[in-house]
Image (cartoon, rainbow, N blue to C red):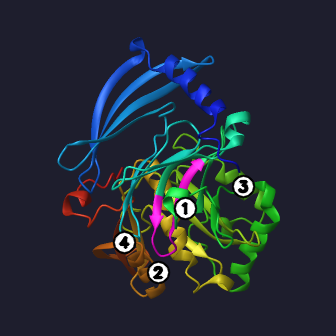
Amino acid sequence: MKNVAFSTEYAEQYNRQFEILFREENRRSKEEGCFANGYSLMCESFEGELDDEPRLAARYALFSPSHEPVFTYACLDSANSLCEMIRHNNGRTYFLFRRDRFGFSVLDLETLQEHRFYSDDALYNQNDFIWCSAEYYPARNTIFVAGHMPGGHYEVYEYDFSDPLHCAAHIPDDALILTLPSTDFADEMEDFRDEYRNWGEEEIFGSALLNSFDDIAEWFAFVDTLGSRKTAPSYYMPSTPFVAFRMSDGMPIGMIEVKHELNDYLSKHGGHISYSVRPSERRRGFGKRMLAMVLPYAKILGHSKVLVVCHTDNEPSRRTILADGGVYEQTYFSELDNIYNENYWIRTTPSGPVGQADFNNAGIVS
């Protein structure tokens, strides 16, 4: 995909939209947020209309830990603003953000050099993957980006980030992609379910009860109800189940499900996130990658941290949770299931250890 961020056509489009959105009468409010590394970001929001479409826009000012001005920029679509601090394996810290609905920018905080990317498909067809949140994965030198196509559902992609200032959204061949279940791959999901059954496993964690449905069409209909409390069954908390596909061969490797909120039961038993890797693909690190991949999406849901639970005798799951930054909270005995569970918290942004105050603000609903 061609980068047109520095083309005359894009500059003309950006400037035209900038002049429309950032009029004085569109000014709304100011707010400031702080990153874990001490940098802060001032946001001045605007609300206008662009081509007969309501649009949120914002001007941003980045400040150093000593509150010295570092960098300013404007975003023409801040409905899902991308503002991420990434500490790279190369020892540098990068600020990842968007100037427009599509594309992304990477700023080296040491040199203040900016890498900008805007695809030709976005410029000419207004159609490209919209970056909303990202998490750096040092083990593979990649970033996991949660976003969506225009009008589409959220997905999570893995992009190469070995050279941040030349990153062009390259997807490694062995990458995983998280996407919502779709009838387009009904046959693959039936095969995925049947493999668990053939291995004698009665439950597929993180699959939205997939193994409870013999008719795959009924399962897809059930999944479609899970997005909100208004449509989800009374016995099931709202959630987003993702299927993890391997890029190289299109095989569904596993499933991972994010609960939008916790009730009392989930706060002790299930947590925010549950996941499973198909039996034939285990012990290859896929669970660790899937868990890390879903964190940017959990952040979009508003979770600064997520609860992940494992049985005390499940050593592989414990290692996966710890590898992705899990911090132990407690061991809880479930009289209902007659098992001991270990509760761990994982931050959705890399901001240091989870403190006791976080546990007191767990967002549990009754």
Given the image, on which type of amino acid does mark 3 rest? Phe
Q: CA distance from mark 1 to mark 2?
A: 15 Å
Q: Position of residue 193 (x, y in %)?
A: 72, 72
**What residue range appears in magenta?**
135-147
Disc 2 secondary structure class: helix
Q: Residue at x 50, y 54 (%)?
A: 297
Q: Using the rendered view, name the quadrant where residue 219 is placed.
A: bottom right
Question: What residue is shown with label 1?
Answer: 257
Tell me if residue 52 can be seen. yes
Given the image, on which type of amino acid does mark 2 rest? Ser
- 314 is higher (above) or lower (below) than 246: below
Q: CA distance from mark 3 to mark 2?
A: 27 Å
Given the image, on which type of amino acid does mark 1 rest? Glu
Residue at the left extreme? 66
Sequence-earlier tag: 4 or 2:
2
Q: Which class describes the residues within 10 Å of circle 1: few (<14), some (14-19), or many (20+)?
A: many
Residue 113 part of the magenta segment: no
Given the image, on which type of amino acid does mark 4 rest? Gly
Q: CA distance from mark 4 to mark 3?
A: 32 Å
- 343 is higher (above) or lower (below) than 156: below
Q: Which class describes the residues within 10 Å of circle 2: few (<14), some (14-19), or many (20+)?
A: some
Viewer-nearest residue: 183 or 354: 354
Sequence-earlier tag: 1 or 4:
1
Disc 4 secondary structure class: loop
Question: What residue is shown with label 2?
Answer: 317
Question: What residue is shown with label 3?
Answer: 220
Q: Residue at x 41, y 35 (%)?
A: 73
Question: What residue is shown with label 4?
Answer: 325
Nearer to us of marks 1 and 3 is 1
Q: Mark number for residue 357? A: none
